[in-house]
Amino acid sequence: MNTDARNTKVMNRFDVTSRLIAKLEHEEAVIGGIGNTNFDLWAAGHRPQNFYMLGSMGLAFPIALGVALAQPDRRVFALEGDGSLLMQLGALSTIAALKPKNLTMIVMDNGIYQITGAQPTPAANVADIVAIATGSGLTNSAWAADEEDFERLVEEAMSAGEPSLIAVRIDDKSGVGATRRDPVQIRERFMHGLGVREPL
Amino acid sequence: MAIAEQQTSSEAAQTSSDKSWHGIVLQTLKRNEISLVPYVPDRVLTPLIKNLHADPFFTTFATAREEEAVGIVSGAWMGGRRGAVLMQTSGFATLANVLASLAVPYQIPLIMFVSERGTLGEFNYGQSLVCRTMRPVLDSLALEHHTITRLDELEFIADRSIKQA
């Protein structure tokens, strides 16, 4: 477990997201949090198992938990920003208590609300996301030291017997793409991707 | 879509008979295959929560915040599993954002049981003010809601609300 943020490389959200997507071979669900997090998920190449949040800031992990509880045989990834996670820290304990084996949480931490004008979050420079997660009961939480380490942690998470959280320090770049903002289409495609509904 | 649960006396709520309000709610959830029930607890809801925990059909657990519970049942529904959320009126007052930016625009059916505090006999001024925000928020989003005031209407309203959602 790497709980030291100081020696981690500053990576890029789109690059890290693309590395995650490249590793998915079993129709894993991916929930993208509000703003840049789901913009980069979209830009990494749309998949039917992707869900893009257009509002409800802070709920990427709870939504992913719901998917994980509904489909215990499918692996579920959730991508969330540090500012979003700060809005819903209690969700970490809920997940720690339920221990879904198939849920992996990824936190993109740049210490700022990039999309609103790069204002620092209250946690920037004072709080440590992995320490918060560990203290919330998610013992399988770690900082990714660099891109290779991130990929290794993703592979570990795929066979872990408990929920995993991977924190990534990222730069202040905005998202690369712009998700098509049609909530009903996003939801319907996602349900097709999960095998819950058949296309008309 | 939303059901406001009128407060019942805690004495009457202690029995777990099928004819009690909580027995009817539990059986109605089960009959409609609603098995995932996250909640933020409320004293009035206590017998229902206790019996949900005791029944292996249900996955029921506390969340730190009501919107977290709405996120969980929304994700579960998209994954093919039905859920419902239990809360108090003050908890409902935290939900305008998630209702307006997740449940309604994505057209995700959402069942909420809200124990109504802040009305007849309320002694806490803050509670009575919070309570007044509930129906205007529901109405502003055209979310259908019913207030249960009679035991003999409970099963019909709960069952048909679930089916309509």
Image (spheres, rainbow, N blue to C red):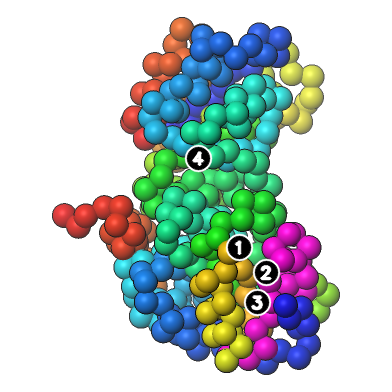
N-term mark: 2 or 1: 2
Instruction: Find the residue positioned furthest to the left.
Output: A200
Picture quadrant where residue A60 is located: bottom right
Q: In this view, does B154 lie to the left or right of B51?
A: left
On whether residue A21 falls in the magenta region, the answer is no
**Marks 2 and 1: same chain?**
yes
On-image quarter of the C terminus of chain A: bottom left
Residue B117: give x, y in percent of width and height. Answer: 67, 24
On whether residue A143 falls in the magenta region, the answer is yes
N-term mark: 3 or 1: 1
Residue at screen point 47% across, 64% down: A76
Task: Return the residue at label 2.
Answer: A140
Q: Are marks 1 and 4 in contact (CB under 8 Å)?
A: no
A55 w.r.t. B60: above or below: below
Q: Is mark 2 on a helix, strand or loop?
A: loop
**Marks 3 and 1: same chain?**
yes
Label 4 amino acid?
A: Leu
Q: Is mark 3 on a helix, strand or loop?
A: strand
Task: Return the residue at label 1.
Answer: A162
